[in-house]
Amino acid sequence: MDYGKYIFVDYENVQDINTGIIGNDIKMLIIVGENQNKIPINLIQKTQPFGNSIEWLQIKSNGKKNALDFFIVYFLGYYISTQSDKEYIIYSKDTGYDPLIDYLRVQNINVKRIVSFKQIVGNNFENECEIFDKIHNENILKIEENLNKVEPNKRPKSKKGLVGHIKTLLKKSDEEIEKIIEEMFIQKIIYEENGHIKYKLK
């Protein structure tokens, strides 16, 4: 089948898969680490109806850190070498892909990295991707104000640590905090580098 858009999911880095974006012209490759053996059954069930449009690839990485990155780069290069006119998307919060993406864009390859499927679907899938309202943004402002008071070397360095920090501050549910953090990634208030959370606070 001829696809117009290819999405590579770094499943070690992001686990929220939005099947609502899959159309006839989209191929999604979900790259999974060898130790990721507890994929939610409801996610598998959601991907089954799409047949070959969604492909799971479990990679033997021998426990090497960031090994999946190299495999994603390999698959990206493989498809670009035969179909350079297609659109390519890497779904990962890891900024390590960005220098390669910048280089490829100079070569007129249509490629980008996203940190949320909201960046693809926009407002077209409101049931799948909640649009953040004024209350959510007020929460983000509170988090920024709080983090600005914390010495840079004492700010949470992992997503788990950031979740705990926000929970203490806002007393929100885990689901609400996940959505707030996703929006912080989208707004580039936080980003990930070599597995650590980094900050660009206002």
Image: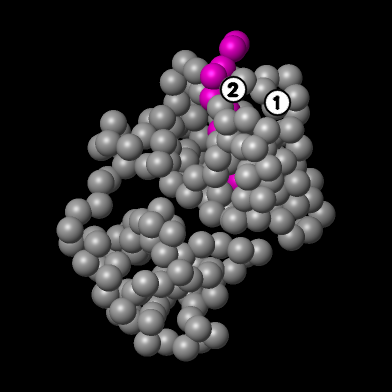
Q: Which residue is mark 1?
A: 79
Q: x, y (%) of residue 182?
A: 40, 56
For label 1, count other residues whose C-alpha is less than 10 Å away and answer few (under 14), some (14-19) or many (20+). few
100 horizontally vs 198: left or right: right
The color scheme shown is: one colour
Q: Magenta segment range?
A: 1-11
Q: Where is residue 145, by image quadrant? A: bottom left
Between 32 and 27, which is closer to the camera in this rendering? 27
Quadrant that contains the N terminus: top right
Which residue is at 56% across, 62% downward? 192
189 horizontally vs 124: left or right: right
83 horizontally vs 19: left or right: right
Kindly identify the amino acid type of the residue bearing the numbered disc 1.
Answer: Tyr
Q: x, y (%) of residue 135?
A: 18, 62
Task: Tell me if I can see residue 21 in this picture.
Answer: yes
Question: In front: mark 2 or mark 1?
Answer: 2
Residue with the most extreme front position? 106
Residue with the most extreme left position? 134
Kindly identify the amino acid type of the residue bearing the numbered disc 2.
Answer: Lys
Cα distance in 3D space between marks 2 and 1: 9 Å
